[in-house]
Amino acid sequence: MRVEAYAGLLESAPGGAVDFDALTAALSEMVMADCRRSAAAPYVQEFTHGPAVYLHAESSAHDARTVLAVGRPQPPACVRDTAYQRGYPLPESLGGRPVDRGHFLPYSGGGFYGPNLYVQDRALNRGWSRDGRAYRALESAAVAGAPGTVMFCRPHFIDDSAVPATIDIGVLAQDWAQVQQFRNRFDEVATKGLGLLDVTLCGATDTQIGALGEETVGVLLQRLCDATIVAMGDAALQREEGRQHLDMLIIIDDAPVAVEVKTRYTSARAGRLTKAGNLPRPRLRRARSQPGHQQASQQYVAARVGDWVDVGEDYLGMEVRVVAVDFVAMLAQQFTVNDAGTALVALEAPVSCLDEAREALAIIVEHRGHL
């Protein structure tokens, strides 16, 4: 179901009060039409629970599940029943991703339990991914809206489980309206036939985005520079005493090169280029625990490559590069960095990293089954 299907509902909202009963009836008819086309022929019951109206479907062909929730967000009438919520059955993970007990209508908007609960992707529920941030923003707007604001949630299912693959969230107020679809499942069944990279990026946490960026740079540098990877990521460069190690140590033309990777996807700088056509220069951190050890500085690098490079009295330092990866523009660019780690200069023009990102994702998925 595409969000364009709600165009008529959205056009009727701005400029006047939202007719809750009429909106609920229209949404119910849309959902019932889908149910009538379904081979499962479910029995659908409509009822009110707290500040929301629900359609709940039961069938011998699939698990009992909520197929629509429409409510007027309001402050919760009672404290959160954590004991009940903990009792809601929940798998450990789905498609390798952790899940939560999510609410169709948020608790902060008065949502109850029972038919209001469902298995929700944790990154979506907690705002840890790009889609999650948009989801939480829309949910917050509904809760903070003026009296009369209406929120609806319409889950879409692809199998006989009660775990939706996607969910449409709509908010209608007197002067604005918005509907957006969010992905809730990332397992093989739910993503078959879709652009796996785009789907994965929207649901990825910042940590997962960073891991994909490092793997992408590994593929890219092997192709561009015939680099040999000595060690990459936390899996090879173990953390000791709380120190943040390098992202990569590689060999180019028989010389060691230290590489720091900076990946952008959710930030405001993602997708932008400078007037000179470069990616914005990455920002390097200061190592607070070790004064003077600016990230990517020679001191910083020397403290982290001792297992692979002799950093004794005769050590003169090594080349250090910072690679920016932009998963919105699908571009990567190499920068050289001075010995102090305070100045970056573009080494070359940005290059496409789309194919490398796809290959990197395939490598990670093959290795552990998911990003």
Image (tube, rainbow, N blue to C red):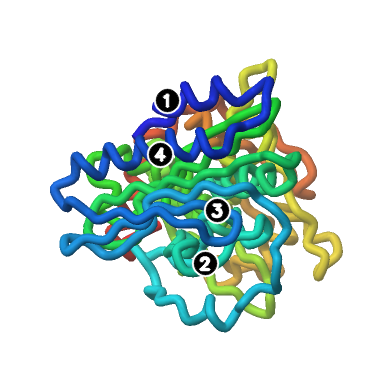
Whether pointer 1 and pointer 2 mark residues with C-beta atoms closer than 8 Å, the reply is: no
Q: Nearer the viewer, residue 364 or 185?
A: 185
Q: Does residue 365 appear in this view?
A: yes
**Count of number-bearing discs:** 4
Q: Earlier in the sequence, mark 2 or mark 4?
A: 4
Labels 1 and 4: the sequence-earlier one: 1
> At 26% across and 54% down in the image, what residue appears?
188
Q: Earlier in the sequence, mark 2 or mark 3?
A: 3
Task: Please name the amino acid that badge 4 sits on.
Answer: Asp
The residue lying at 51 percent from left, 33 percent from top is 22
The amino acid type, in three-letter code, at marker 1 is Glu
Q: Secondary structure at mark 4?
A: helix
Q: Position of residue 295 (x, y in %)?
A: 72, 55
Whole-percent x and y of residue 58?
27, 61
Query: CA gap, disc 2 to disc 3?
Result: 46 Å
Mark carried by residue 129: none
Cα distance between the residues tagged 3 and 4: 33 Å
Quadrant for the N terminus in the image? top left
Q: Earlier in the sequence, mark 3 or mark 4?
A: 3
* Residue at 60% over, 26% down: 13
| Circle 3 residue | 52
Could you tell me the amino acid type at mark 2? Asp
Kindly report which numbered mark, 3 or 4, lies closer to the viewer in this rendering. 3
Which mark is on residue 4? 1
- Relative to residue 360, is residue 290 depicted above or below? below
Q: Quadrant of the C terminus?
A: bottom left
The residue indicated by pointer 2 is 234
Up-down relation of residue 192 to residue 16 (above or below)? below
Marks 3,1: beta carbons within 8 A: no
Residue picked out by circle 4: 198
Alpha carbons under labels 2 and 4: distance apart: 25 Å
In this rendering, which labeled residue sits more in front, label 2 or label 3? 3
